Image (tube, rainbow, N blue to C red):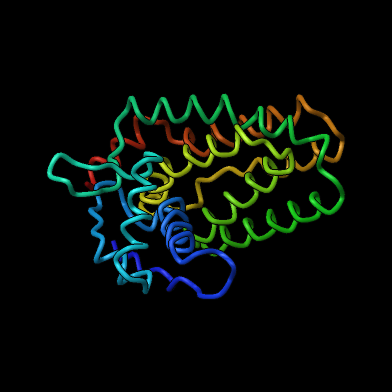
Amino acid sequence: MSAALNPAERGCGATLQEQAYQSLRTAIMCGRFVPGHALTIRGIAEMLGTSLMPAREALRRLVAERALELLPNRRVSVPKMTPARLEELAAARLALEPLAAVRALPAIDTECLTQLQRIDAEIDAALAAGEVERYLLKNQAFHLTLYRAGHSQVLIPLIESLWLQFGPFMRMMLGRIGASYVLDRHVEALDAITRRDALALRLAIEGDIRDGMGSIGQEELLRLYRAGS
């Protein structure tokens, strides 16, 4: 899969190494690299428009975060999905994300709610246009904007780690079966936020995660994935 990345921008405050890391991290999270795709330091440096050092450091950090794996031959690749891994990722998301949403609820003000509504409209537009990558980016933005309102220093890094591991697989599946099967529970979440209903918000986030992974079943997802591998 082609994975051209935008060159790291200079002069925006962050170090070049941090910019390279964030660019590569975003690319993995939105699935620009398919499961099993091998990454090289030189290739990443060329895509990012940097020297080898920032690319090497970005790969090292993402291996440590389990977004990438270091193979016995010392090559770095995007991890492949297995039934056990998919089930564990789903269980972890269901445990952490509703909790993060409920904890964030008291801190969501009018400005944050308006931002969430705007992002949800952008999600609808991406789905209507069949733009898979844009949908994934906006869907992640919706969830993370919601969760980050709670300023959790523990839950957010854990959730982002799960999305890094899940993104490549979901992007591959949506690319094959289309985004039309996606069921959007964000309207329910927004309604729960407006009413300050913690239970309804928890159920909406749980439903959104289950629908995103289970509309055609985990076994069917993996069958389609293996058929195209």
Up-down: is 30 above or below 43?
above
Position of 113 compared to 69: left or right? right
x and y percent of residue 182 in the render?
53, 45
Q: Residue at x 84, y 54 (%)?
A: 111
Q: Is residue 226 left or right of residue 216?
A: left
| 87 is higher (above) or lower (below) than 162 | above
- In this picture, is 109 found above or below 52? above
Q: Quadrant of the N terminus?
A: bottom left
The image shows residue 222 at horizontal and vertical percentages of 31, 35
Judge from the rendering whether residue 60 lies leftward or rightward of residue 93; answer left or right. left
Q: Position of residue 127 (x, y in %)?
A: 56, 57
Q: Nearer the viewer, residue 9 or 184?
A: 9
Instruction: Residue lying at the far left in this picture: please name it.
Output: 73
Residue at 61 percent of width and 52 percent of height: 141
Quarter of the figure with residue 54: bottom left
Name which residue lies at 78% across and 27% down: 198
Q: Residue at x 40, y 53 (%)?
A: 28
Which sits in the foreground, 126 or 141?
A: 141
Residue 71 lies in what quarter of the image?
A: top left
Estimate the x, y position of residue 154 in percent, counting from the top left. 60, 32
